[in-house]
Image (cartoon, coloured by chain):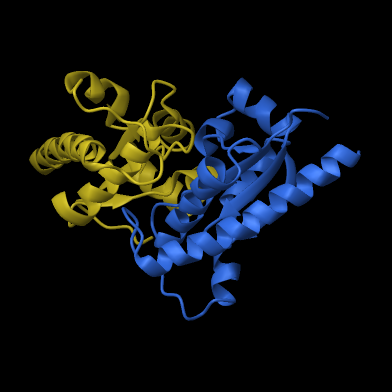
Amino acid sequence: MTLATGKVGIICCSGEDLPEGTISRVATRLVLEKLRPDQTVTLCLPLFLAGGEDERAFARVFPTIAVDGCDKKCAEAGTKKFSGKPVATILVSEIMKKYPRLKVKSREKLDPQEMELATKVAEEIAKKVDEILCKTAKK
Amino acid sequence: MENHKVVIVPCSGIGKSLGTVGRVATYKVIEQMKPEETRTVCLALLTMGDDDALKLVRENPCIAVDGCPAQCSKKNIEASMGKLAHNIVVTDVLRNNRSLKPDGVIELNDQGDKLAEIIARILSEKVDEILHKVKRE
């Protein structure tokens, strides 16, 4: 991983046991690949937690957003423990409450409804990225 | 040891497609091939020291599925004092299947899915071996 200026790190939980973990993962990649490709990088949470020095160094220096599937908030807690408090946390289970018609059940491949929810989560992440970079630019 | 399940823990590395290959292979086993004999646990939850997650990996045989040689899943299971029964590294399996070019993180391409199938079959055989051994102990 190369350190770069003007970037926001997105750390998602990728929780394997819950569909919300897959939503967190897909939403993060949507931001990286489609919504804000030039402004964001992702950090591998297991590597970060296992002691990846590059990952920890990035999260100490650059603003991060944690994307968690459930209220155990592993991405937020892990980032806080090993680097610094994330600037923002996006909680998939909270966003789901705003869209009760969108049900999630798949952990492997997302169906169109689940992909719609992942897109909503990705849009929330992108909004936060813009807010953070706007604040950073003003400083 | 009765009613024990094999806990399959993929690293879910998000930077490259190989993390997704391991994750998809895991779901193929726990949801389709061996749903009664296997389950997974959130790796991040385990690493953060959640009591239930720790109990699960300490009381059941585990298989780590890692995308790359950093082997985060294996290391985290060992650090949690889990019962690591086996580990698979996707790059090792890819080395034996050089014609496959996996791509995609949100969704794997066909070759990535084929690699996940190959790994799922290896995992499934390993699950049988492990449970057979456990029953004999």
Q: Report the side of B92 relative to B20 (left or right).
A: right
- Give the percent coordinates (x, y) of residue B16: 40, 60
Picture coordinates of residue A126 (x, y %)? 16, 41
User: Is residue A95 found left or right of B83 in the rendered image?
Assistant: left
Looking at the image, can residue B61 be seen?
yes
Name the residue nearer the viewer: A13 or A40: A13
The image quadrant of residue B81 is: top right
Q: Nearer the viewer, residue B79 or B61?
A: B61
Among the chains, which one is blue?
B
Q: Residue A63 versus residue B71: which sits nearer the camera?
A: B71
Q: Is residue B68 left or right of residue A133?
A: right
Q: Note whether B96 is above or below A23 in the view shown.
A: below
Quadrant, the N terminus of chain B: top right
For image coordinates 38% across by 60% down, the residue present is: A1
Give the residue at x 41% y 26%: A73
Q: Is residue B68 visible?
A: no
Q: Which chain is yellow?
A: A
Residue visible at 48% across and 31% down? A81
